Image: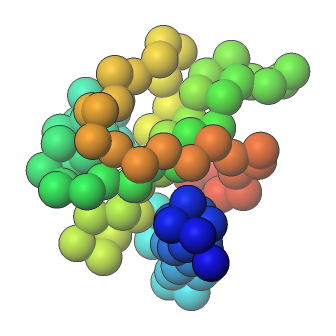
Amino acid sequence: MSGAAATGASTAAIAATIANAIKACGTLIRVEPQEFLKIVGKQDQPLVVIKSPGAFSHSTKYLTSYKGLAFHCKSQTELMIPSNTEVIHAKKFSMPDI
């Protein structure tokens, strides 16, 4: 497996782990966009899943994990994600509307 393929596989595994953790415990913490950026900034190698606005949504959705918890936010404007962040662009988010 090439380096790029291995990185892609590990990224997919991390995203699946986050998704499974959310399903298992149901813990999703909604925060404001600026608080979300603070959480991402505390991590050495952050991973953020982004869902761009669609036909029925005017906001971008963001998801990350930190210390075993899953944090998400919505923003009408694009957030300035730190350059050291690994980003996954999701086709669809499936999360409860709390």
**Residue at the image position 56 percent from the left and 40 percent from the top:** 50
Total numbered circles: 0
Identified at 48% across, 23% down, the residue is: 75
The N terminus sits in image quarter = bottom right
Q: Position of residue 24 (x, y in %)?
A: 57, 86
Q: Give residue 68's position: percent from left, percent from top.
A: 30, 76
Q: How is the image coloured?
A: rainbow
Residue 13: percent from the left, percent from the top? 57, 76
Farthest bottom residue? 24
Above or below residue 2? Residue 53 is: above
Location of residue 79 (image quadrant): top left
Residue 56 image-quadrant placement: top right
Q: Which residue is at a point 50% across and 32% down the rendered structure image?
A: 74
In the displayed structure image, the side of residue 84 where residue 25 appears, left or right: right
Residue furthest toward the right?
Answer: 55
Tell me if 43 is positioned left or right of 13 in this view: left
In the rendered image, the residue lying farthest to the top is 77
- The front one of 32 and 79 is 79
Q: Is residue 11 visible?
A: no
The single residue placed furthest to the left in the displayed view is 42
Of 2 and 49, nearer the camera is: 2
Side (left or right) of 49 relative to 95: left
For the point 68% across and 17% down, which residue is it? 58
Q: Decide: is 3 above or below 63.
A: below
User: Can residue 55 be seen here?
Assistant: yes
Position of residue 97 measured from the top left corner of the image (x, y, whole percent): 64, 50
